[in-house]
């Protein structure tokens, strides 16, 4: 029989436990027994054990004292306390000393077996069950990939794939992640075709005849809350992918109930285009053509094209509600700005909308390509997701959500676009006035293979602005990225496997919109 684990049983009446020990040994566990705490401590110093069963009442050192010394020697060693005493103070003491379990005598062999199995084999059982469930659903996902024909189909498919990404991330040795990555690649191929065939129609269609795009996000998700008389904290975390949003959600759900929806980022899936579209309710081309004063403010600063957002947001709320909405707009780039906002948050309690733009995830995306340290910390999607999860759990933003719950605010959490890990460097010919984007470019006389990019000759066809006279756009498909022929291999090495945005992919375009109401 396969060895299931090595157990040390410490009990002054251990000879009376022979049926229990035989039962564990029949199940494949190796059990060593000692009759007092000091011998138990000597054993764990000299030998390796997977689990300790520890009696609480023994002559000499009692179980709690032994437990403390064992945990001091090896904090990771799981210990199950077994006692005749049902006093709550003792349970509290055992819990505070971080026992793995607590059993009250008399116990039968199957109880002991179940407790050992849960501690020693739970992770393996859950992994196998998750793997089995994924393999059972594999065929269904393949069918959905083949039959997806509208935007809801693509969202539901992408959402399921992301859930499996999170579920299976610890099972690298089983080859399931590779299969899942293949499905996502295949899905992106089909999604790019779908967007290519439909996007031009979407940007010309009326609201009910197109998906909820960035320009519709406030009207579709925020305005109904205001009409119901709710006060809203509107949080836009720049560049937050669906998988990252799902990773931080458990922390948020301690105080809120979540309703998960989505919207579709406009092209290019980049902050100047998508975030302006959210806060203005307009395409950038329409701002350029119809609102010259706002356009001038938008392009005034080369490093950021989002300076007009506060003004545009106020105008949008007025247009959608027919009144001036009491609101405020805040943008946070660094932690000290976030702490400052948090310290003053309750001052905005009479506002109908508190808009908060958070740039941390976007900054992380941009800096990773230039930082060896970040590349070590974020080697792949799983690492990126875990870092965002850790940041959020320990950040000022988590405290903002708690404060929102205290203020009885409804929270609307979303993003402007996601990001994708790029794999395929594509040569592009361009002049010196061409923009510097990795996944999208605009300029004059841009040349690139249409196999790897959406080539836009007339910006107006896609409701895109004329940045220079005769502007062309290139928007990368799937996991491609643009590299100039000059020093091609140098930039290929720098950008390969980096996280970028601006292009067409499930990860960049299908972004979460989550409504959170206090529990």
Image (cartoon, rainbow, N blue to C red):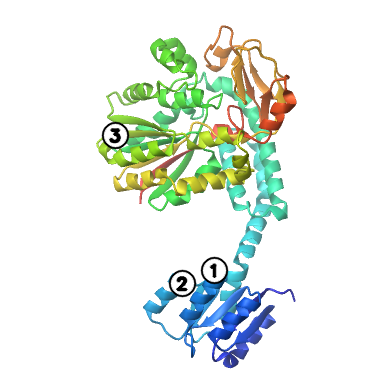
Residue 346: where, in percent of width, then height? 27, 41
Q: Which residue is mark 2?
A: 97
Residue 315: where, in percent of width, then height? 34, 21
Say which quarter of the image contains residue 2: bottom right
- Left or right: residue 229 versus residue 134 is left
Mark 1 burial class by Cα count in 10 Å: few <14, some 14-19, many 20+: few
Please tell me which residue is depicted at 35% across the width and 51% down the height of the picture. Answer: 519
- Left or right: residue 236 versus residue 159 is left
Q: Earlier in the sequence, mark 1 or mark 3?
A: 1
Mark 2 burial class by Cα count in 10 Å: few <14, some 14-19, many 20+: some
Q: Alpha carbon of mark 1 to alpha carbon of mark 3: how far?
A: 50 Å
Identify whether 261 is placed above or below 31. Answer: above
Please tell me which residue is depicted at 62% across the width and 26% down the height of the picture. Answer: 439
Asked whether disc 1 touches disc 3, contact meaning CB atoms under 8 Å apart, the reply is no
Q: Which of label 1 and label 3 is nearer to you?
A: 1
Q: Give me the disc on residue 75.
A: 1
**Element carrying mark 3:** loop
Q: Earlier in the sequence, mark 2 or mark 1?
A: 1
Nearer-the-camera pick, 461 or 436: 436
**Element carrying mark 2:** loop
Residue 370: where, in percent of width, then height? 61, 33
Say which quarter of the image contains residue 46: bottom right
Mark 3 burial class by Cα count in 10 Å: few <14, some 14-19, many 20+: some
Q: Which residue is mark 3?
A: 352
Q: Which of label 2 and label 3 is nearer to you?
A: 2
Asked whether disc 2 touches disc 1, contact meaning CB atoms under 8 Å apart, the reply is no
User: In the displayed image of the protein, which residue is found farthest to the top?
Assistant: 469
């Amino acid at each position: 029989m396969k060895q299931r684990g090595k157990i040390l049983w410490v009990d002054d009446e251990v000879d009376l436990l022979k049926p229990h020990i035989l039962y564990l040994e029949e199940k494949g566990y190796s059990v060593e027994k000692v009759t007092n705490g000091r011998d138990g401590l000597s054993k764990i110093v000299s030998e390796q054990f997977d689990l300790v069963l520890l009696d609480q009442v023994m002559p000499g050192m009692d179980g709690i004292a032994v437990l403390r010394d064992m945990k001091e020697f090896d904090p990771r060693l799981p210990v199950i306390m077994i006692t005749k005493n049902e006093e709550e103070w003792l349970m509290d003491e055992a819990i505070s000393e971080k026992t793995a379990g607590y059993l009250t005598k008399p116990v039968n062999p199957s109880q002991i077996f179940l407790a050992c199995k849960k501690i020693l084999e739970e992770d393996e059982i859950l992994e196998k069950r998750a793997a089995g469930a994924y393999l059972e659903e594999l065929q269904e996902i393949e069918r959905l990939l083949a039959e997806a024909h509208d935007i809801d189909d693509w969202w539901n498919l992408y959402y399921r794939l992301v859930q499996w990404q999170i579920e299976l991330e610890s099972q690298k040795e089983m080859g399931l992640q590779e299969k899942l990555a293949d499905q996502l690649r295949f899905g992106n191929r089909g999604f790019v075709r779908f967007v290519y065939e439909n996007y031009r129609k979407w940007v010309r269609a009326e609201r009910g005849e197109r998906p909820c795009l960035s320009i519709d996000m406030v009207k579709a998700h925020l305005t109904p809350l205001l009409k119901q008389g709710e006060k809203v904290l509107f949080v836009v975390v720049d560049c937050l992918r669906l998988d990252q949003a799902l990773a931080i959600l458990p922390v948020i759900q301690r105080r809120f109930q979540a309703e998960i929806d989505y919207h579709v980022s406009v092209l290019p899936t980049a902050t100047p285009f998508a975030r302006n579209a959210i806060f203005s309710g307009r395409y950038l081309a329409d701002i350029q053509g119809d609102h010259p004063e706002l356009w001038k403010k938008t392009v005034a600063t080369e490093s950021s094209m989002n300076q007009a957002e506060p003004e545009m947001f106020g105008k949008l709320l007025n247009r959608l509600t027919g009144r001036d909405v009491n609101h405020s707009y805040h943008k946070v780039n660094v932690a000290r700005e976030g702490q400052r906002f948090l310290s003053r948050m309750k001052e905005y309690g009479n506002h109908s909308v508190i808009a908060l733009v958070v740039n941390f995830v976007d900054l992380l995306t941009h800096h990773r390509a230039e930082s060896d340290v970040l590349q070590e910390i974020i080697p792949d999607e799983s690492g990126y997701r875990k870092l965002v999860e850790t940041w959020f759990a320990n950040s000022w933003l988590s405290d903002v959500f708690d404060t929102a719950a205290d203020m009885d605010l409804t929270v609307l959490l979303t993003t402007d676009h996601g990001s994708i890990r790029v794999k395929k460097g594509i040569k592009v010919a361009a002049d010196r006035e061409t923009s510097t984007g990795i996944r999208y470019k605009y300029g004059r006389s841009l040349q690139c293979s249409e196999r790897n990019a959406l080539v836009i000759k007339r910006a107006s066809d896609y409701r895109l602005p004329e940045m220079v006279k005769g502007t062309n756009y290139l928007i990368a498909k799937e996991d491609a990225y643009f590299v100039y022929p000059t020093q091609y291999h140098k930039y290929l090495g720098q950008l390969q496997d980096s996280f970028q945005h601006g292009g067409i992919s499930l990860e960049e375009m299908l972004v979460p919109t989550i409504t959170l109401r206090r529990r």
